[in-house]
Image (cartoon, grey):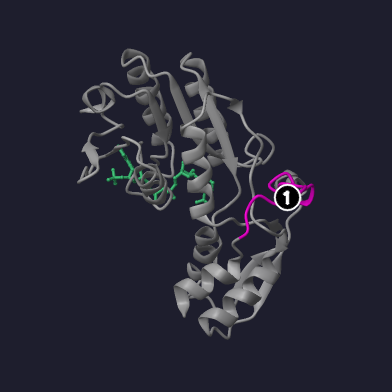
């Protein structure tokens, strides 16, 4: 598993090991359950994938370098005769006009075109991301809460799902998963403010154009019965109480 020391990789690797599977991580740092390799330079990646059947790809730099990482991983997976690649991705990336999301679409394409049988699980934003969107504004007199809805999900629930997919056969793109409720940023901010003891009010933000139109259309959401159960309040209580 790549990215096994990350916020999603840690519980995913734990879930696989706890279930008795011979799983190991691959990160630059390495560690007890992980091999040290650098997906950006390619150093150590072939050695890291030797003898591996299934690769769960969760490594990220949160930027453009992830394209190079995906290319290196795809090529190494072919050389290692990997039989299943599992990729986590993000809901709505092909419909939301953000350059970061265009990169995520490209990463899906890179892994798909490797020819290694693939499973792609798109998920909505983790609770921690919403938390950091508010926390990052600590030096502003108000908190800007764009007039959009999110459906944040607990990272542990995504991890459980990825572990399950890794143990199954390749399935192509599987149904998207999201958290228990679709909520406005103002509503999420109210919960965050109550949990963190903040006093600053939220100020809405709306812009014309394709970006807000996409969010208005709800392409970042997962309609129907919710996959996730853990609420943003559960996350906040665990972190801030
Ligand atoms: N945050 C969200 O709301 C959200 C929602 C849906 C999907 N996702 C996706 O979930 C995935 C995991 O995100 P995360 O938040 O768990 O990431 P994270 O906490 O930032 O962890 C990143 C991981 O990548 C590894 N890494 C970075 N550069 C590397 C390199 N050059 N070579 C090898 N390993 C490298 C890091 O380990 P070392 O530093 O040890 O190398 C670390 O284990 C991402 O693909 C993200 O797009 C996130």
Q: Which residue was labeled with disc 1? A: 215
Q: Quadrant of the N terminus?
A: top left
Ligand 1 found in image quarter: top left
Up the image or down, 146 lies above or below 72; here it is below
Q: Residue at x 36, y 17 (%)?
A: 75
| x and y percentages locating residue 73 in the rendered image | 36, 25
In the figure, is residue 83 to the left or right of 180?
left
Helix, strand or loop for disc 1: helix
| x and y percentages locating residue 22 in the rendered image | 31, 35
Q: Residue at x 64, y 55 (%)?
A: 179
Q: Circle 1: is it few (<14), some (14-19), or many (20+) Cα within 10 Å?
A: some
State yes or no: Cβ of the residue under disc 1 lies below 8 Å from any atom of ligand 1: no
Q: Is residue 217 magenta?
A: yes
Frontmost residue, 14 versus 107: 14
Q: Residue at x 29, y 37 (%)?
A: 24
- Span colored in magenta: 216-229
Q: Quadrant for residue 93, please give it.
A: top right
């Amino acid at each position: 598993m790549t990215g096994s020391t990350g916020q999603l990789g840690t519980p995913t690797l734990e879930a696989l090991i706890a279930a008795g599977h011979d799983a190991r991580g691959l990160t630059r740092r390495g560690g007890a359950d992980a091999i040290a390799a650098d997906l950006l330079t390619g150093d150590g990646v072939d050695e890291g994938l030797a003898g591996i059947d299934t690769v769960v790809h969760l490594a990220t730099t949160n930027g453009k370098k992830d394209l190079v990482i995906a290319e290196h991983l795809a090529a190494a997976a072919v050389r290692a005769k990997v039989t299943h690649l599992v990729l986590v991705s993000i809901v709505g990336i092909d419909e939301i006009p953000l350059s970061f999301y265009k990169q995520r679409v490209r990463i899906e394409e890179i892994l798909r075109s490797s020819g290694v049988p693939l499973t792609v699980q798109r998920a909505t934003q983790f609770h921690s991301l919403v938390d950091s969107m508010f926390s990052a504004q600590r030096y502003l007199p108000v908190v800007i809460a764009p007039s959009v809805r999110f459906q944040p999900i607990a990272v542990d629930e995504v991890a459980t799902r990825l572990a399950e997919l890794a143990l199954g056969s390749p399935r192509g793109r599987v149904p998207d998963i999201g958290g228990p409720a679709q909520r406005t940023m103002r509503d999420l901010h109210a919960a965050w403010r109550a949990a963190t003891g903040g006093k600053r009010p939220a100020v809405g933000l709306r812009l014309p154009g394709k970006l807000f139109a996409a969010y208005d259309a709800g392409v970042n959401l997962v309609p129907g019965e919710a996959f996730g159960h853990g609420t943003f309040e559960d996350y906040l209580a665990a972190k801030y109480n």
